[in-house]
Image: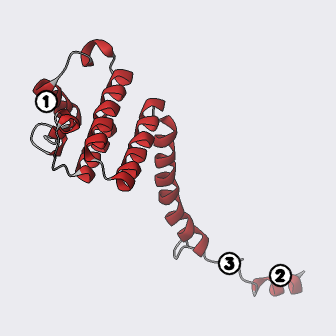
């Protein structure tokens, strides 16, 4: 037994290796750190589109068609009339006929400015929606009018 105790005396205790460090991160973790915010951003856009009311989707699609028709025909009178009708129909679908139907002229433009939180309709190109459909010659920037209408539809 003495020999056994002598042999065991020279043995050392078990030494465990250092714990594995979390840093530096493995490439998979870096990809995950980049992909998660990108996926969240994409999902927010998709959910926003999916949850968008049907009247708004249809109105934006119709506005795109009006823009394409203007590029083909170059008829600003007709385009202003179509935009004015589209705005009116969209607001009736969203708010209802009671509040929107009686608004005309400057009161109508001021109402549109309040909704869009701009002054595009009382002071800008949007002003033409009440006069251009009936004027012989009109100097309307249709692209700006379509942009103002998109902004208005976005606030609905």
Q: Disc number at residue 21?
A: none
Pick the front one: 73 or 18: 73
Residue shown at 32%/30% (left/top)? 85
State which quarter of the image contains the C terminus. top left
Q: Nearer the viewer, mark 1 or mark 3?
A: 1
Give the mark nearer the N terminus: 2 vs 1: 2
Q: Residues within 10 Å of mark 3 (few under 14, many from 20)?
A: few
C-beta proximity under 8 Å, tags 2 and 1: no
Residue shown at 31%/53% (left/top)? 74
Total marks in image: 3
Residue shown at 61%/76% (left/top)? 18
The alpha-carbon separation of the residues under discs 2 and 1 comes to: 101 Å
Query: In this view, which residue lies farthest toward the right?
Result: 1
Residue 128: x and y, percent? Answer: 17, 40
Q: With respect to residue 131, does 145 lie above or below? A: below
Q: With respect to residue 99, does 73 lie above or below? A: below
Residue 91: x and y, percent? Answer: 32, 26
The alpha-carbon separation of the residues under discs 1 and 3 comes to: 81 Å
Residue shown at 15%/38% (left/top)? 127
Q: Disc number at residue 110?
A: 1
Q: Looking at the image, can residue 20 be seen? A: no
Q: Say whether residue 61 is left or right of residue 107.
A: right
Q: Residue under circle 2?
A: 5
Q: Say whether residue 97 is left or right of residue 103.
A: right
Q: Residue under circle 3?
A: 15
């Amino acid at each position: 037994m003495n020999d056994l105790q002598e042999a065991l005396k020279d043995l050392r205790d078990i030494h465990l290796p250092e714990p594995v460090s979390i840093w530096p991160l493995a490439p998979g973790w870096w990809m995950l750190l980049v992909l998660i915010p990108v996926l969240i951003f994409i999902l927010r856009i998709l959910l926003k589109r999916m949850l968008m009311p049907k009247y708004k989707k249809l109105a934006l699609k119709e506005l795109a068609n009006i823009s394409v028709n203007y590029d083909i025909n170059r008829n600003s009178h007709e385009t202003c009339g179509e935009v004015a009708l589209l705005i009116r129909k969209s607001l009736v679908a969203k708010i209802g006929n009671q509040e929107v139907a009686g608004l005309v002229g400057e009161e109508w433009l001021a109402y549109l400015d309040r909704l869009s939180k701009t002054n595009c309709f009382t002071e800008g190109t949007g002003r033409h929606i009440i006069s251009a459909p009936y004027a012989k010659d009109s100097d309307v920037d249709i692209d700006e009018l379509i942009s103002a209408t998109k902004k208005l539809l976005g606030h609905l």
